[in-house]
Image (cartoon, rainbow, N blue to C red):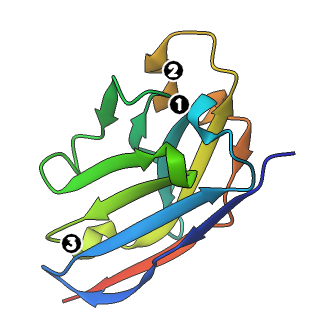
Amino acid sequence: QVQLVESGGGLVQAGDSLRLSCTASSNTLSTYGMGWFRQAPGKDRTFVAAITRSGDYIYYADSVKGRFTISRDNAKNTMYLQMNRLKSEDTAAYYCAARVSQLSLSSLLQYDYYYNFWGQGAQVTVSS
């Protein structure tokens, strides 16, 4: 069973930056498609960003394009979400997810049902 551990959440002011990290329990993260999702209280879980195993394809939600950057360091078994110019509407619990043995279209990484494993969540709160 793959374990994903998240870190980097916190309380910041609007316009500030945060970087979330997601580390896998094994040294095989290079074989996983990875993604980030978020959920605010009373709202549905929504897609934020995703990256294929080799990083050749990257996807972003329109609401974060130009502000957030997804990346991965396979040697460190870690995926990152750099969040810049944060807004109050970015406040949510952020979840990393892994798709083990991705054999289908990379575009499926934009959908939560496609993933096998999830992190515990990291709270991001942006105040104005």
What residue sits 32% from the left and 31% below the top?
A: 58
Kindly state the secondary structure of the residue where label 1 is placed. loop
The residue under label 2 is 108
The quarter of the picture where the N terminus appears is top right
Q: Position of residue 4 (x, y in %)?
A: 69, 57
The quarter of the picture where the C terminus appears is bottom left
- CB of mark 1 within 8 Å of CB of mark 2? yes
Kindly state the secondary structure of the residue where label 3 is placed. loop
The residue under label 3 is 86
Q: Position of residue 46 (x, y in %)?
A: 46, 47
Quadrant in the picture for residue 98? top right
- CB of mark 3 within 8 Å of CB of mark 1? no
What residue sits 32% from the left and 32% below the top?
A: 59
Q: Nearer the viewer, residue 17 or 37?
A: 17
| Amino acid, disc 1 | Tyr
Would residue 32 be visible to someone looking at this image?
Answer: no
Q: Nearer the viewer, residue 73 or 3?
A: 73
Determine crowd level at label 2: few under 14, some 14-19, many 20+ residues with C-alpha closer than 10 A.
Answer: some
| Amino acid, disc 2 | Leu
The outermost residue toward the top is 104
Q: Earlier in the sequence, mark 3 or mark 1?
A: 3
The residue under label 1 is 111
Would residue 30 be visible to someone looking at this image?
Answer: yes
What is the CA distance from the residue labelled 1 to the residue labelled 2?
6 Å
Report the side of 58 relative to 53 (left or right): left
